[in-house]
Image: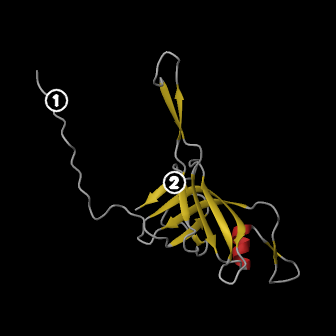
Amino acid sequence: MANLTLKKPTATLTANLGLSIGQAGIYWAARGKVLDSTEWTHLGVVLVGTGSITDEAPTKTDISVEELDTPIHTIWDKASGMVYEGDIPDLSIESAIKLLGAEQNASFDNVVGLTGQTFVKEGMFWLQSQNGKGIVFTNASLVANISGNATKTETLNIHIQVTANAGGGAGFEEKAVMLIN
């Protein structure tokens, strides 16, 4: 009888690990195809330490029967999409209109009114890394609110939360999230 010999796999690390380091900018565009001609709008600068991206881990549901100790089937479900959050320290009229859905006051040029309703902006979102890598949400929803502290050393901010929705549809990208290398 022969002996079983397991061979150890070999792997080598290279200098190009595909690391995404730092944040070079966050951008918005109308929903469509990601092309060289796509017109991206800069959303604002983000406070250090507030920009984060999360991708919820899938949940596991085991289908078990009384007669067996191990499941007969496992279902993996991805409950929600990828989410980007960050704080933009800019309460200018332009940012309030762009991110909060504020409306220009009829009587004063330097006043905008907030609607009191949750403003949802739909489109494409691009998180660009400093080394040129990045993530694009091809169908995204952006919601924002004012947050922060009104102290000598801190700022009031527009906190944004951008969620990747399902991709697809005529004239749109098929995948909800794209990695740019």
Which tag is nearer the camera, tag 2 or tag 1?
1
View extreme (top): residue: 67
Give the position of the C terminus as an image quadrant.
bottom left
Which residue sits at x=54%, y=56%? 54
Spatial distance from mark 2 to mark 1, Cα to Cα? Answer: 43 Å
Front residue (pair 90, 134): 90
Q: What residue type is labelled 1?
A: Leu
Residue 10 placement, left or right of 165: left
Q: Residues within 10 Å of mark 1 (few under 14, many from 20)?
A: few
Q: Where is residue 135 in the image (x, y as percent from the top left)?
A: 49, 60
In the image, residue 164 sits, relative to residue 145, either above or below, namely above
The image shows residue 29, relative to residue 109, as above or below, that is above
At horizontal 26% and vertical 58% (from top left) the residue drawn is 13
Relative vertical location of residue 72 with respect to residue 118 in this rendering, above or below: above
Q: Report the residue marked by disc 1.
A: 4
| Badge number at residue 177 | 2
Towards the viewer: 123 or 160: 160
State the SS at label 2. Answer: strand
Mark 2 is on which residue type? Val
Residue 33, visible in the rendered structure: no
Residue 162 picture quarter: bottom right
Side of 1 relative to 54 (left or right): left
Q: Is mark 1 on a helix, strand or loop?
A: loop
Q: Is residue 69 left or right of residue 113?
A: left
Residue neighbourhood size for the residue with mark 2, other residues' Cα within 10 Å, grouped as few (<14), some (14–19), many (≥20): many
Of callouts 2 and 1, the N-terminal one: 1
Give the farthest residue toward the left: 1
